[in-house]
Image: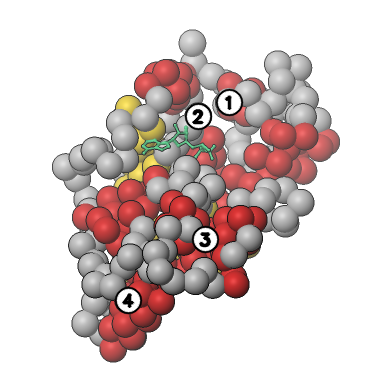
Amino acid sequence: MILDLKSKTIMNKEIESLWRGTSVELLKALHILTRDGKLNADSRRKLKQVQHLTQLMEPMIQKIAKIQGKISVVDMGAGKSYLGFVLYDLILKNLPEPRLISIESRSELIEKSKKLAEDSQFDGMHFLAASIEEAKLDEPIDLVCALHACDTATDDAIAFGIRQNAKAFALVPCCQAEIAGQLNQVKGAELSPLAKHPLHRREFGSHLTNVIRTLYLSSLGYQVTVTELVGWEHSMKNELILAEKRSSPDHPESLKSKAALIKLLSEYHVNPKLTRLAGIEIADLA
Ligand SMILES: C[S@@+](CC[C@H](N)C(=O)[O-])C[C@H]1O[C@@H](n2cnc3c(N)ncnc32)[C@H](O)[C@@H]1O
Protein backbone atom coordinates (compact mmCIF):
# COMPACT_ATOMS: atom_id res chain seq x y z
CA MET A 1 0.00 0.00 0.00
CA ILE A 2 1.27 3.48 -0.84
CA LEU A 3 0.10 6.30 1.41
CA ASP A 4 -1.63 9.13 -0.37
CA LEU A 5 0.32 11.98 1.19
CA LYS A 6 -1.52 14.55 -0.90
CA SER A 7 -4.89 13.77 0.67
CA LYS A 8 -6.21 16.65 2.73
CA THR A 9 -9.85 15.72 2.74
CA ILE A 10 -10.34 15.12 6.42
CA MET A 11 -8.03 17.85 7.71
CA ASN A 12 -10.08 19.77 10.26
CA LYS A 13 -9.41 23.36 11.31
CA GLU A 14 -7.30 22.53 14.37
CA ILE A 15 -5.05 20.13 12.51
CA GLU A 16 -4.80 22.52 9.60
CA SER A 17 -3.52 25.20 11.98
CA LEU A 18 -1.06 22.78 13.65
CA TRP A 19 0.34 20.64 10.86
CA ARG A 20 2.63 22.09 8.20
CA GLY A 21 3.20 18.76 6.44
CA THR A 22 1.86 17.48 3.16
CA SER A 23 -0.85 15.24 4.50
CA VAL A 24 -2.72 14.05 7.54
CA GLU A 25 -2.29 10.47 6.30
CA LEU A 26 1.25 10.40 7.69
CA LEU A 27 0.00 11.62 11.09
CA LYS A 28 -2.59 8.85 11.12
CA ALA A 29 -0.01 6.24 10.22
CA LEU A 30 2.20 7.52 13.05
CA HIS A 31 -0.84 7.27 15.37
CA ILE A 32 -0.55 10.98 16.15
CA LEU A 33 -4.08 11.20 14.78
CA THR A 34 -6.80 8.68 15.49
CA ARG A 35 -8.30 6.79 12.51
CA ASP A 36 -11.09 9.37 12.32
CA GLY A 37 -8.58 12.19 12.22
CA LYS A 38 -8.73 13.43 15.84
CA LEU A 39 -5.93 14.57 18.12
CA ASN A 40 -5.74 13.70 21.81
CA ALA A 41 -3.86 15.85 24.36
CA ASP A 42 -0.70 13.71 24.31
CA SER A 43 -0.44 13.58 20.55
CA ARG A 44 -1.15 17.32 20.26
CA ARG A 45 1.78 17.91 22.65
CA LYS A 46 4.04 15.53 20.72
CA LEU A 47 3.16 17.05 17.36
CA LYS A 48 3.83 20.60 18.59
CA GLN A 49 7.11 19.53 20.15
CA VAL A 50 8.42 17.68 17.11
CA GLN A 51 7.34 20.37 14.66
CA HIS A 52 8.90 23.08 16.79
CA LEU A 53 12.16 21.14 17.01
CA THR A 54 12.10 20.70 13.25
CA GLN A 55 11.67 24.46 12.83
CA LEU A 56 14.59 25.17 15.17
CA MET A 57 16.79 22.68 13.30
CA GLU A 58 15.92 23.99 9.86
CA PRO A 59 18.56 26.79 9.66
CA MET A 60 21.42 24.37 10.39
CA ILE A 61 20.02 21.79 7.96
CA GLN A 62 19.67 24.36 5.16
CA LYS A 63 23.15 25.71 5.86
CA ILE A 64 24.79 22.26 5.65
CA ALA A 65 22.77 21.30 2.55
CA LYS A 66 23.73 24.58 0.85
CA ILE A 67 27.45 24.15 1.54
CA GLN A 68 27.61 20.46 0.65
CA GLY A 69 24.78 20.09 -1.83
CA LYS A 70 23.33 17.22 0.25
CA ILE A 71 22.81 16.23 3.87
CA SER A 72 22.89 13.15 6.06
CA VAL A 73 21.09 13.15 9.43
CA VAL A 74 21.03 10.50 12.17
CA ASP A 75 18.19 10.33 14.70
CA MET A 76 19.38 8.50 17.83
CA GLY A 77 16.99 6.63 20.13
CA ALA A 78 14.39 7.28 17.45
CA GLY A 79 11.50 5.38 19.09
CA LYS A 80 8.62 5.47 16.57
CA SER A 81 10.67 7.91 14.46
CA TYR A 82 8.19 10.79 14.81
CA LEU A 83 11.03 13.26 14.53
CA GLY A 84 12.54 11.52 11.52
CA PHE A 85 9.23 11.40 9.61
CA VAL A 86 8.37 15.01 10.37
CA LEU A 87 11.89 16.22 9.51
CA TYR A 88 11.81 14.24 6.29
CA ASP A 89 8.32 15.36 5.28
CA LEU A 90 8.78 19.04 6.13
CA ILE A 91 12.40 19.66 5.14
CA LEU A 92 14.63 16.83 3.99
CA LYS A 93 12.58 15.47 1.10
CA ASN A 94 12.78 18.87 -0.57
CA LEU A 95 16.59 18.84 -0.52
CA PRO A 96 18.94 17.05 -2.92
CA GLU A 97 20.04 13.51 -1.92
CA PRO A 98 18.59 13.55 1.60
CA ARG A 99 19.54 10.73 4.00
CA LEU A 100 17.97 10.22 7.38
CA ILE A 101 19.02 7.23 9.45
CA SER A 102 16.99 6.30 12.52
CA ILE A 103 18.82 4.25 15.13
CA GLU A 104 16.75 2.54 17.79
CA SER A 105 17.39 -0.52 19.96
CA ARG A 106 13.79 -1.83 19.78
CA SER A 107 13.69 -3.78 16.53
CA GLU A 108 9.87 -3.96 16.42
CA LEU A 109 9.71 -0.14 16.24
CA ILE A 110 12.33 -0.12 13.50
CA GLU A 111 10.35 -2.68 11.46
CA LYS A 112 7.15 -0.59 11.68
CA SER A 113 8.96 2.61 10.74
CA LYS A 114 10.68 0.92 7.80
CA LYS A 115 7.29 -0.16 6.47
CA LEU A 116 5.82 3.32 6.92
CA ALA A 117 8.78 4.91 5.10
CA GLU A 118 8.27 2.47 2.20
CA ASP A 119 4.53 3.17 2.09
CA SER A 120 5.23 6.90 2.13
CA GLN A 121 7.87 6.54 -0.61
CA PHE A 122 10.38 8.32 1.61
CA ASP A 123 13.33 6.70 -0.15
CA GLY A 124 15.99 8.61 1.76
CA MET A 125 14.86 7.24 5.15
CA HIS A 126 16.88 4.31 6.53
CA PHE A 127 16.65 2.37 9.76
CA LEU A 128 19.05 0.53 11.98
CA ALA A 129 18.00 -1.66 14.91
CA ALA A 130 21.00 -1.25 17.23
CA SER A 131 22.12 0.30 20.44
CA ILE A 132 23.71 3.71 19.95
CA GLU A 133 26.92 2.52 21.67
CA GLU A 134 27.39 -0.24 19.12
CA ALA A 135 26.02 1.46 16.02
CA LYS A 136 28.52 1.81 13.20
CA LEU A 137 27.94 3.69 9.97
CA ASP A 138 30.46 3.72 7.15
CA GLU A 139 29.41 7.05 5.76
CA PRO A 140 29.80 10.69 6.71
CA ILE A 141 27.14 12.06 9.06
CA ASP A 142 26.42 15.77 9.11
CA LEU A 143 23.86 16.19 11.85
CA VAL A 144 23.11 14.05 14.90
CA CYS A 145 19.80 14.54 16.67
CA ALA A 146 18.43 12.84 19.76
CA LEU A 147 15.01 13.67 21.15
CA HIS A 148 14.53 12.34 24.67
CA ALA A 149 17.15 9.58 24.31
CA CYS A 150 17.06 8.14 27.82
CA ASP A 151 19.68 8.92 30.47
CA THR A 152 23.19 8.26 29.10
CA ALA A 153 21.91 7.52 25.56
CA THR A 154 22.35 11.26 24.86
CA ASP A 155 26.03 10.86 25.84
CA ASP A 156 26.34 7.92 23.46
CA ALA A 157 24.75 10.03 20.72
CA ILE A 158 27.28 12.84 21.30
CA ALA A 159 30.20 10.38 21.34
CA PHE A 160 28.90 8.80 18.11
CA GLY A 161 28.65 12.22 16.42
CA ILE A 162 32.17 13.17 17.50
CA ARG A 163 33.52 9.88 16.11
CA GLN A 164 31.71 10.55 12.84
CA ASN A 165 32.98 14.14 12.75
CA ALA A 166 29.41 15.51 12.71
CA LYS A 167 29.04 19.16 11.80
CA ALA A 168 26.11 19.73 14.10
CA PHE A 169 23.97 18.35 16.94
CA ALA A 170 20.39 18.90 18.07
CA LEU A 171 19.83 17.27 21.46
CA VAL A 172 16.84 17.29 23.80
CA PRO A 173 18.03 15.20 26.75
CA CYS A 174 15.72 13.01 28.79
CA CYS A 175 15.74 11.68 32.37
CA GLN A 176 19.34 11.87 33.66
CA ALA A 177 20.02 9.73 36.68
CA GLU A 178 23.72 8.96 36.35
CA ILE A 179 25.20 12.11 37.87
CA ALA A 180 22.65 12.31 40.70
CA GLY A 181 23.93 8.84 41.70
CA GLN A 182 27.57 9.97 41.53
CA LEU A 183 26.84 13.09 43.60
CA ASN A 184 25.50 10.84 46.32
CA GLN A 185 28.62 8.68 46.44
CA VAL A 186 31.27 11.27 47.24
CA LYS A 187 33.30 9.81 50.08
CA GLY A 188 34.75 11.98 52.82
CA ALA A 189 33.31 15.17 51.39
CA GLU A 190 30.16 16.93 52.38
CA LEU A 191 27.47 17.12 49.72
CA SER A 192 27.03 20.57 48.25
CA PRO A 193 23.84 22.22 49.57
CA LEU A 194 22.85 22.29 45.89
CA ALA A 195 22.51 18.51 45.97
CA LYS A 196 21.70 17.70 49.56
CA HIS A 197 18.02 16.81 49.20
CA PRO A 198 17.17 13.94 46.82
CA LEU A 199 14.86 16.09 44.71
CA HIS A 200 17.49 18.85 44.39
CA ARG A 201 20.12 16.21 43.70
CA ARG A 202 18.09 14.89 40.80
CA GLU A 203 17.39 18.35 39.36
CA PHE A 204 20.92 19.60 39.97
CA GLY A 205 22.38 16.35 38.60
CA SER A 206 20.34 16.81 35.45
CA HIS A 207 21.45 20.44 35.10
CA LEU A 208 25.09 19.52 35.74
CA THR A 209 24.88 16.75 33.11
CA ASN A 210 23.73 19.19 30.45
CA VAL A 211 26.33 21.80 31.44
CA ILE A 212 29.02 19.11 31.09
CA ARG A 213 27.64 18.15 27.65
CA THR A 214 27.71 21.75 26.43
CA LEU A 215 31.22 22.37 27.80
CA TYR A 216 32.46 19.17 26.19
CA LEU A 217 31.06 20.17 22.80
CA SER A 218 32.49 23.72 23.16
CA SER A 219 35.88 22.25 24.08
CA LEU A 220 35.91 20.52 20.69
CA GLY A 221 35.14 23.69 18.76
CA TYR A 222 31.34 23.55 18.57
CA GLN A 223 29.37 26.72 19.08
CA VAL A 224 26.60 25.82 21.49
CA THR A 225 23.17 27.35 22.04
CA VAL A 226 20.93 26.20 24.87
CA THR A 227 17.30 27.06 24.66
CA GLU A 228 13.79 25.97 25.59
CA LEU A 229 12.16 23.58 23.13
CA VAL A 230 8.52 24.45 23.78
CA GLY A 231 6.59 26.10 26.61
CA TRP A 232 6.99 24.18 29.87
CA GLU A 233 3.30 23.31 29.77
CA HIS A 234 4.07 20.93 26.89
CA SER A 235 6.98 18.98 28.33
CA MET A 236 9.17 18.82 31.40
CA LYS A 237 12.06 17.54 29.30
CA ASN A 238 12.45 20.74 27.49
CA GLU A 239 16.09 21.75 27.16
CA LEU A 240 17.37 21.96 23.59
CA ILE A 241 21.12 21.92 22.97
CA LEU A 242 22.10 23.01 19.47
CA ALA A 243 25.77 22.77 18.53
CA GLU A 244 27.56 23.66 15.30
CA LYS A 245 31.21 22.99 14.55
CA ARG A 246 32.92 26.34 14.11
CA SER A 247 36.53 25.91 15.22
CA SER A 248 39.05 23.37 16.48
CA PRO A 249 39.92 21.98 19.93
CA ASP A 250 43.08 24.13 20.02
CA HIS A 251 41.18 27.41 19.56
CA PRO A 252 41.54 29.59 22.72
CA GLU A 253 37.76 29.48 23.35
CA SER A 254 37.78 25.66 23.10
CA LEU A 255 40.71 25.45 25.52
CA LYS A 256 38.86 27.74 27.94
CA SER A 257 35.84 25.42 27.80
CA LYS A 258 38.03 22.37 28.37
CA ALA A 259 39.57 23.99 31.47
CA ALA A 260 36.08 24.89 32.75
CA LEU A 261 34.93 21.32 32.13
CA ILE A 262 37.83 19.76 34.09
CA LYS A 263 37.31 22.24 36.93
CA LEU A 264 33.60 21.42 37.11
CA LEU A 265 34.17 17.65 37.09
CA SER A 266 36.76 17.97 39.86
CA GLU A 267 34.69 20.36 41.92
CA TYR A 268 31.68 18.04 42.01
CA HIS A 269 33.62 14.74 41.90
CA VAL A 270 31.68 13.46 38.92
CA ASN A 271 32.72 11.76 35.71
CA PRO A 272 29.67 10.96 33.54
CA LYS A 273 29.57 8.55 30.63
CA LEU A 274 30.36 11.25 28.08
CA THR A 275 33.63 12.33 29.69
CA ARG A 276 34.55 8.69 30.44
CA LEU A 277 33.99 7.86 26.76
CA ALA A 278 36.18 10.84 25.89
CA GLY A 279 38.93 9.43 28.13
CA ILE A 280 38.93 12.41 30.49
CA GLU A 281 40.44 11.33 33.82
CA ILE A 282 39.69 13.24 36.96
CA ALA A 283 42.55 12.48 39.32
CA ASP A 284 40.85 13.35 42.57
CA LEU A 285 37.52 11.57 42.04
CA ALA A 286 36.36 9.71 45.14
C1 LIG B 1 11.74 8.37 25.39
S1 LIG B 1 11.91 7.48 23.90
C2 LIG B 1 12.02 8.78 22.72
C3 LIG B 1 11.72 8.32 21.35
C4 LIG B 1 11.74 9.39 20.26
N1 LIG B 1 13.04 9.99 20.09
C5 LIG B 1 10.68 10.41 20.51
O1 LIG B 1 11.00 11.47 21.06
O2 LIG B 1 9.52 10.13 20.22
C6 LIG B 1 13.58 6.91 23.98
C7 LIG B 1 13.90 5.86 22.94
O3 LIG B 1 15.30 5.64 22.94
C8 LIG B 1 15.55 4.25 22.82
N2 LIG B 1 16.88 4.03 23.44
C9 LIG B 1 17.25 4.27 24.72
N3 LIG B 1 18.55 3.98 24.91
C10 LIG B 1 19.01 3.57 23.70
C11 LIG B 1 20.29 3.13 23.25
N4 LIG B 1 21.34 3.10 24.08
N5 LIG B 1 20.43 2.76 21.97
C12 LIG B 1 19.36 2.81 21.10
N6 LIG B 1 18.13 3.23 21.48
C13 LIG B 1 17.96 3.59 22.76
C14 LIG B 1 14.42 3.59 23.57
O4 LIG B 1 14.20 2.26 23.14
C15 LIG B 1 13.25 4.52 23.21
O5 LIG B 1 12.57 4.09 22.05
Can you say which quadrant of the picture contains the C terminus? bottom left
**For the residues bearing labels 2 and 4, Cβ distance under 8 angstroms:** no
Q: CA distance from mark 2 to mark 3?
A: 28 Å
Earlier residue among tags 4 and 1: 1
Q: Position of residue 36 (x, y in %)?
A: 76, 17
Q: Nearer the viewer, mark 1 or mark 3?
A: 3
Q: CA distance from mark 4 to mark 1?
A: 43 Å
Q: Is mark 2 within 8 Å of ligand 1?
A: yes
Q: CA distance from mark 2 to mark 4?
A: 37 Å
Q: Position of residue 117 (x, y in %)?
A: 44, 25
Name the residue beneath numbered marker 1.
30
Q: Position of residue 270 (x, y in %)?
A: 38, 64
Name the residue beneath numbered marker 4.
262
Name the residue beneath numbered marker 2.
80
Q: Nearer the viewer, residue 226 or 58?
A: 226
**For the residues bearing labels 1 and 2, Cβ distance under 8 angstroms:** yes
> Residue at the location (49% across, 66% down)?
208
> Residue at the location (16% across, 42% down)?
138
Q: Nearer the viewer, mark 2 or mark 3?
A: 3
Q: Is residue 251 left or right of residue 96?
A: left
The residue type indicated by label 3 comes to: Gly
Looking at the image, can residue 62 be seen? no
Q: Residue 198 is drawn in which quadrant? A: bottom right
The residue type indicated by label 1 comes to: Leu
Q: Nearer the viewer, residue 133 or 203?
A: 203
The residue type indicated by label 4 comes to: Ile
Label 1 packing within 10 angstroms: few (<14), some (14-19), many (20+): some
What kind of element bears circle 3? Answer: helix
| Tally of marks | 4
Q: Is mark 1 within 8 Å of ligand 1?
A: no
Name the residue beneath numbered marker 3.
205
